[in-house]
Image: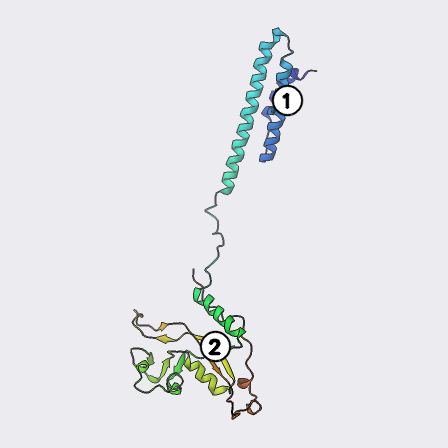
Amino acid sequence: MALIDNIPALLEEVKQLHASTAGELEELRIKYLSKKGLIPQLMNEFREVAADRKRELGVAINNLKTAAQDHINALREQLNEQQAAEDTPDLTRTAYPTPLGTRHPISIVRDEIIDIFSRLGFCLADGPEIEDDWHVFGSMNFPDDHPARDMQDTFFIEAHPDVILRTHTSSVQSRVMEKQQPPIRVICPTKPSRKTEAATLPLPLSIQQKDGLSSRLPSSGAVKREDTPKSASNRPNQPLPATLPPEPTIS
């Protein structure tokens, strides 16, 4: 039976076509509309049809071709609409998880400084932010009339004037030297507090300071390593941790 005699069956078959993916749709197009597809084969057979049937079969073949093109185009549009719906976010669902914040630039620079000094053999030291006058000023030989002691630069506790917010990292170095004999190699990446012109609010201005202290045994041998107490505070310098405790992140 010639293929051209199956035009009605092919027309019904085309109307039932369906595709769930773009690949399946492309296979249907190739099967029916490509150069070697079923409908072009009908065109080839049409040349051998008797003259008295050409009009009738020509109309049938054209209707079949139009139906196949329209149906495949409709399937393609349907797939595009489904894809667009999948790409549209669902505004009724819970918000998608998003990364919260990132590392503060000061934290990045601080860790880089610590890493450099750790490779030079320095240890990490820190102390209290609420200090006493002795460790901040007295142990550093600051005279009573030193400008840093002025109320405009230092935050004193009104009820206890000897208690202050540390204004520099020297208080940490003072505490280290109280507990440890030379050789000493420490870095003090701390946050002093000062009242300066940059502070527009009546609050401490927290700044970043990275100080280092390096002290070695005197050449005269007045202090010998074996005479140094073996307490935990006098042990040889320990390696630095990889990083300081993390600071709050910013968005």
Picture coordinates of residue 118, whole percent (x, y): 53, 74
Label 1: element kind: helix
How many numbered circles does the render carry? 2
- Amino acid carrying mark 1 in the image: Leu
Picture coordinates of residue 111, whole percent (x, y): 49, 69
From the viewer's perspective, is the residue at label 1 or at label 2 nearer?
2
Is there CB contact under 8 Å for labels 1 and 2? no
Q: Residue at left 63%, top 18%?
A: 42
Closer-to-camera residue (127/92): 127
Label 2: element kind: strand
Q: Which residue is mark 1?
A: 38
Q: Give the quarter of the image for residue 157.
A: bottom left
Picture coordinates of residue 195, whole percent (x, y): 32, 75
* Quarter placement of the C terminus: bottom left
Q: Is residue 215 above or below residue 73?
A: below
Left or right of residue 251, residue 10 in this image: right
Q: Is residue 28 above or below residue 177?
A: above
Closer-to-camera residue (214/162): 214
Q: Mark number for residue 144? A: none
- Farthest residue toward the right? 1
Q: Residue at left 55%, top 24%?
A: 69
Q: Is residue 75 above or below residue 10?
A: below
Closer-to-camera residue (238/77): 238
Separation (CA) of disc 1 from disc 2:
83 Å
Count neighbours of disc 1 (C-alpha within 10 A) and say few if under 14, some if 14 to 19, many if 20 or more.
Answer: some
Whichever of callouts 1 and 2 sits on the residue coming sooner in the sequence is: 1
Q: Residue at left 59%, top 16%?
A: 61
- Amino acid carrying mark 2 in the image: Ile
Q: Mark number for residue 187? A: 2
